[in-house]
């Protein structure tokens, strides 16, 4: 029996934004694989004939790739199928288009994208653990274990070795990363994330003060960030141990307890993770931004001749 099938085209502009999709339809008999093969053979010809549909919500290529990672790429242009009167589960092939030409280097089935399979087919050297597959289960994503492995393994190693400044640098970098995942490339993301999820009141500090400390220790390994020098925030630092006999405010510096911040951050992380249960729509953006993360827990391993190997983040 003949079925209407679709060649879909996603037109990305110079800024990697897709605001227009296109389609060409065919009535075709045969198995699903035969129909897919037919559509693939017709890609170039159908591109010239494609009817274009403006999308009410444009999306970037990185957003599209992230949605493909979780088998939801087609949701970004579902309105195209609504406009064409397609059924609930139309058979289609989708192809990105850039500068008027089809633009792809890998072809896969619709569904969860296996990045290692893609790398292998593209001939890229090395095998890297896919965090999404490693930490996913039928119950969802184990956010806590993911963050522990990517950040807190190193934080604990340095802290337990008495390298407290290094451990604090790693902790504020972790906050930076989660803030970026939540808010994107926003200079105020660190403070916004801390104010939204972390209760710093028991430590006697504010998110803005912690941001000032973060800037000082990461950029110069001192306490003199620009906001401190301008008098916008107090000069703060940290100590290990919070004995009440030792005052917190000494020599113009306010000292909070390092472990107190770790505990406050752990509670903040739990609140943040819960926000994904409250708003499932956030998950696609999490995948998009976490895919940019590099980690000691995920390095690409390429085996060389004579038993040698090379690694890269």
Image (tube, helix red, strand yellow):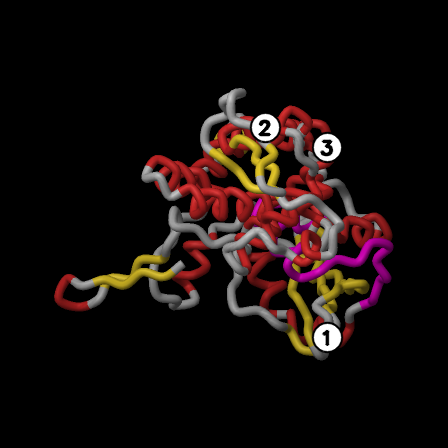
Residue 72 vs 39, above or below: the answer is: above
Q: Position of residue 198 (x, y in %)?
A: 66, 31
Q: How far apart in space, not on screen, are marks 2 and 1 (Cα)?
A: 43 Å
* Residue span colored magenta: 51-75
Q: In the visual, does 248 lie left or right of 277?
A: left
User: Which one is closest to the eye, mark 2 or mark 3?
Assistant: 2
Secondary element at image label 2: helix
Contact, mark 2 vs mark 3 (Cβ under 8 Å): no
What residue appears at the point 52 percent right and 69 percent down from the top-left corner? 105
What residue appears at the point 43 percent right and 47 percent down from the top-left corner? 166
Q: Residue furthest front?
A: 251
Tell which of 64 and 49 is nearer to you. 64
- Mark 1 lies on residue: 14
Q: Which residue lies furthest to the left in this view?
A: 306
User: Can residue 142 be seen in this snapshot?
Assistant: no
- Mark 2 lies on residue: 264
- Mark 1 or 3 closer to N-term? 1
User: Can residue 50 be seen in this snapshot?
Assistant: yes
Q: How far apart in space, not on screen, are marks 1 and 3 (Cα)?
A: 31 Å
Q: Where is residue 244 in the image (x, y as percent from the top left)?
A: 54, 20
- Mark 3 lies on residue: 279
Secondary element at image label 3: loop
Local crowd size for mark 2, using a 10 Å CA cut-off: few (<14), some (14–19), many (≥20): some
Quadrant housing the C terminus: bottom left
Residue 49 vs 18, above or below: the answer is: below
What residue appears at the point 55 percent right and 55 percent down from the top-left corner? 292
Tell which of 170 and 75 is nearer to you. 170
Local crowd size for mark 3, using a 10 Å CA cut-off: few (<14), some (14–19), many (≥20): few
Q: Where is residue 251 in the image (x, y as percent from the top left)?
A: 58, 41
Contact, mark 1 vs mark 3 (Cβ under 8 Å): no
């Amino acid at each position: 029996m003949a079925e209407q099938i679709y060649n879909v085209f996603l037109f990305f502009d110079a800024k990697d934004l897709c605001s227009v999709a296109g389609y060409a339809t065919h009535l075709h008999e045969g198995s699903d694989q035969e129909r897919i093969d037919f559509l693939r053979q017709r890609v170039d010809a159908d591109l010239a004939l494609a009817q274009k549909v403006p999308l009410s919500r444009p999306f970037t290529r990185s957003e599209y790739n992230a949605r493909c990672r979780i088998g939801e790429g087609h949701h970004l242009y579902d309105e195209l199928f609504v406009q064409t009167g397609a059924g609930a589960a139309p058979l289609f092939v989708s192809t990105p288009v850039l500068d008027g030409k089809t633009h792809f280097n890998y072809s896969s089935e619709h569904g969860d994208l296996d990045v290692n399979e893609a790398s292998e087919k593209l001939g890229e050297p090395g095998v890297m653990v896919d965090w999404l597959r490693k930490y996913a289960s039928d119950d969802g994503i184990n956010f806590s274990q993911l963050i522990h492995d990517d950040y807190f393994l190193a934080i604990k190693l340095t802290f337990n070795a008495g390298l407290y400044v290094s451990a604090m640098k790693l902790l504020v970098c972790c906050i930076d990363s989660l803030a970026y995942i939540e808010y994107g490339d926003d200079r105020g993301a660190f403070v916004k994330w801390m104010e939204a999820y972390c209760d710093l009141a028991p430590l006697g500090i504010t998110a803005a003060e912690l941001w000032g400390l973060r800037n000082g220790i990461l950029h110069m390994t001192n306490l003199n960030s620009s906001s401190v020098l301008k008098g916008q925030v107090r000069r703060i630092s940290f100590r290990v141990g919070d004995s009440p006999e030792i005052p917190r405010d000494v020599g113009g510096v306010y000292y909070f307890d390092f472990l107190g911040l770790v505990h406050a951050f752990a509670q903040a992380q739990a609140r943040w993770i819960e926000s994904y249960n409250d708003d499932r729509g956030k998950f696609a953006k999490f995948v998009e931004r976490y895919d940019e993360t590099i980690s000691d827990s995920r390095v690409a391993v390429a085996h060389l001749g004579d038993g040698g190997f090379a690694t890269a983040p």
